[in-house]
């Protein structure tokens, strides 16, 4: 279910004959959704009250895509949504923030003192694989394991530390042993 349904009217045309009022969008500049799937787009209404046909496009196809007349949120992130009707244009921003399950991909069971390993993280929203947005990596004990911004771990001294990866409101944790 989409957390915030976009319900608004797009007025295209003129209030009086001969006046030049371009399209306006009566919605917030940003619309947030918390799940992947269909996004309700504004209904376009002409000055005479009839419904206009708007052609929608997206800037970032990893976040949203247009299939026929439907706008779909397909991944986390933000994108500008552009609408066109009779050479008139309008735009708004779609922010997709679904709950993502983070998973480590083939993590090492251990690293040696002075050795490094690259941790890789995958995200899922339901059965859909998504690329997590910015990931913040932390080590529970930097005297045992250091971790860099890109997920590279380095064994410092023998022991156990917990590596946590956070992205958006989601996190994943991995126990990593450092051996001699």
Image: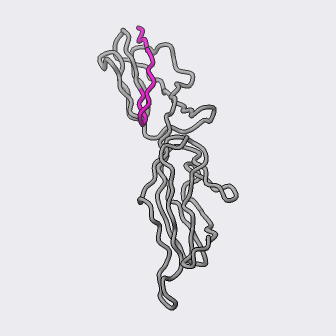
As drawn, is 118 to the left or to the right of 87? left
Question: Which quadrant would the N terminus be assigned to in this image?
Answer: top right
Vertical order, 8 against 105 (above or below): below
Vertical order, 138 against 16 (above or below): above
Residue 130, position in %: x, y?
57, 38
For the point 57% across and 22% down, the residue is 106
175 within the magenta span? yes
Vertical order, 158 against 15 (above or below): above
Residue 37, position in %: x, y?
60, 44
Q: Nearer the viewer, residue 108 or 87?
A: 87
79 within the magenta span? no
For the point 51% across and 56% down, the residue is 7
Q: Quadrant of residue 74?
A: top right
Task: Give the residue furthest to the bottom.
Answer: 18
Residue 143, position in %: x, y?
29, 17
Q: Quadrant of residue 58?
A: bottom right
Q: Nearer the viewer, residue 50 or 135?
A: 50
As drawn, is 175 to the left or to the right of 38? left
**Numbered disc total:** 0
Task: Give the residue furthest to the left.
Answer: 143
The colour scheme used to paint the residues is one colour
| Predominant SS of the magenta segment | strand
As drawn, is 20 to the left or to the right of 156? right
Residue 108, position in %: x, y?
51, 17
Task: Give the residue furthest to the front.
Answer: 49
Question: Which quadrant would the C terminus be assigned to in this image?
Answer: top left
Q: Nearer the viewer, residue 47 or 85?
A: 47
As drawn, is 168 to the left or to the right of 144? right
Magenta segment? 165-180
């Amino acid at each position: 279910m989409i957390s915030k349904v976009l319900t608004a009217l797009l007025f295209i045309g003129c209030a009086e004959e001969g006046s030049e009022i371009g399209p306006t969008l009566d919605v917030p500049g940003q619309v947030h959704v918390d799940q992947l799937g269909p996004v309700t787009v504004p209904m376009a209404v002409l000055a005479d009250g009839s419904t206009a046909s708007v052609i929608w496009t997206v800037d970032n196809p990893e976040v949203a895509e247009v299939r026929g007349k439907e706008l779909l949120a397909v991944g986390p992130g933000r994108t500008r949504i552009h609408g066109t009707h009779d050479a008139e244009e309008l735009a708004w921003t779609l922010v997709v923030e679904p709950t993502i399950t983070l998973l480590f991909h083939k993590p090492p069971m251990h690293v040696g003192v002075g050795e490094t390993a690259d941790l890789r993280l995958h995200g899922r929203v339901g059965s859909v694989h998504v690329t997590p947005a910015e990931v913040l990596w932390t080590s529970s004990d930097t005297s045992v394991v250091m971790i860099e911004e890109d997920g590279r771990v380095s064994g410092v001294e023998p022991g156990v530390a917990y590596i946590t990866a956070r992205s958006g409101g989601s996190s994943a944790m991995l126990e990593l042993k450092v051996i001699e």
